[in-house]
Amino acid sequence: MRDRDAFSSYHPAVNMLYFALVLCFSMFFLHPVCLGISLVCASVYALYLNGKKALKFGVIYLLPMMLITVLLNPVYNHEGSTVLTYFPDGNPLTLESIWYGIAAAITMGSVIAWFSCYNEVMTSDKFVYLFGRVIPALSLILSMSLRMVPRFTARLRVIAEAQRCVGRDVSRGGLLTRARHGIRILSVMVTWALENAVETADSMKSRGYGLKGRTAFSIYHIDRRDWYALSYLAVCGALILGGAAVGGLYFRYFPTVKGVGSGALSVSLYAVYAALCVMPVIINLREDLKWRVIRSKI
């Protein structure tokens, strides 16, 4: 799915700035309209990138996590002035804590969805390209850490399939037998990881990593399209931050639920925020439309 994502073809600076804005805004702006816009746009983009995989993750993992957050927050958070009832231990159940639990759940869901999109778009080579000269050691560690889990998961699946072919299946046999087969698979996995670390270190050393004046090859070049996108993101981010600074996105949950509603400033900020969050989807739909038009003319 990622191969047809037009937004991924933009310069890494555009991708990084976009995700930095939407992630920060999703975490700090708790206005219900902003939360809804962020969750919907993140979900749509994740579905565009990963399709059924994103839908399965959302239904099996993300929705239950959000529901648990909604249910648990009023149990431990008793702030608010509107008391609905009392728990058996004497603590109050407040309307404000319920609303805040819903807001916290939506925030968590949108941030996780945005990070799933980030992992698809911001590859390790893009991250190293952006931060390799500024923080070379940290950028290398972060890029290796981000790819470690999916890479090791794929390798573990291959090792488990190979061991199953020789009769060492962890899903069959008694408890001790399955444990012995699992230990064998883990041993092979650890051995492969150590060998891979040595090979990576030797490869980096032979390529002169860490030497002063070392150059690096890069396939990324910023062009007019990227400058337009950077300008768009900068204008949207500045407008949203400026509007939030003057109270255009103000909203509170304690001690009572109160915030700005449908004023001209707030509505305009909602529109700008939606235009920012939906940017990759619009780019992809536009490119898909262009491709269909070209194919229809062949």
Image (cartoon, rainbow, N blue to C red):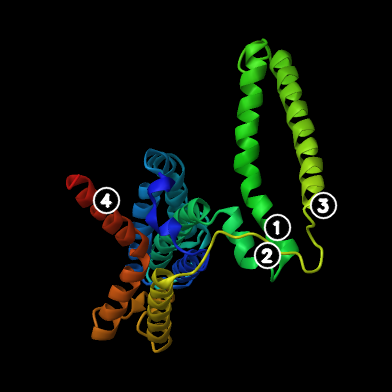
Q: Which residue is mark 2?
A: 132
CA distance for labels 2 and 1: 7 Å
Q: The disc labelled 2 sits on which kind of residue?
A: Gly
Closest to the observer, 102 or 184: 184
**Who comes first in sequence, dot 3 or dot 4?**
3
Q: Which residue is mark 4?
A: 291
| Marks 1 and 3 close (CB-CB < 8 Å) | no
Tell me the residue at 45%/47% (across/down).
62
Q: Residue 101 location, x and y as percent?
A: 44, 61
Q: The disc labelled 4 sits on which kind of residue?
A: Trp
Tell me the residue at 23%/53% (across/down).
289
Badge 1: residue crowd in 10 Å (few <14, some 14–19, many ≥20): some
Q: The disc labelled 1 sits on which kind of residue?
A: Leu
**Who comes first in sequence, dot 2 or dot 1?**
2
CA distance for labels 1 and 3: 14 Å
Badge 3: residue crowd in 10 Å (few <14, some 14–19, many ≥20): few
Looking at the rendering, which quadrant does residue 198 occupy? top right
| Marks 2 and 1 close (CB-CB < 8 Å) | yes
CA distance for labels 1 and 4: 37 Å
Closest to the observer, 166 or 290: 290
Q: Which mark is residue 140?
A: 1
| Marks 1 and 4 close (CB-CB < 8 Å) | no
Tell me the residue at 81%/68% (across/down).
212
Looking at the rendering, which quadrant does residue 251 occupy? bottom left
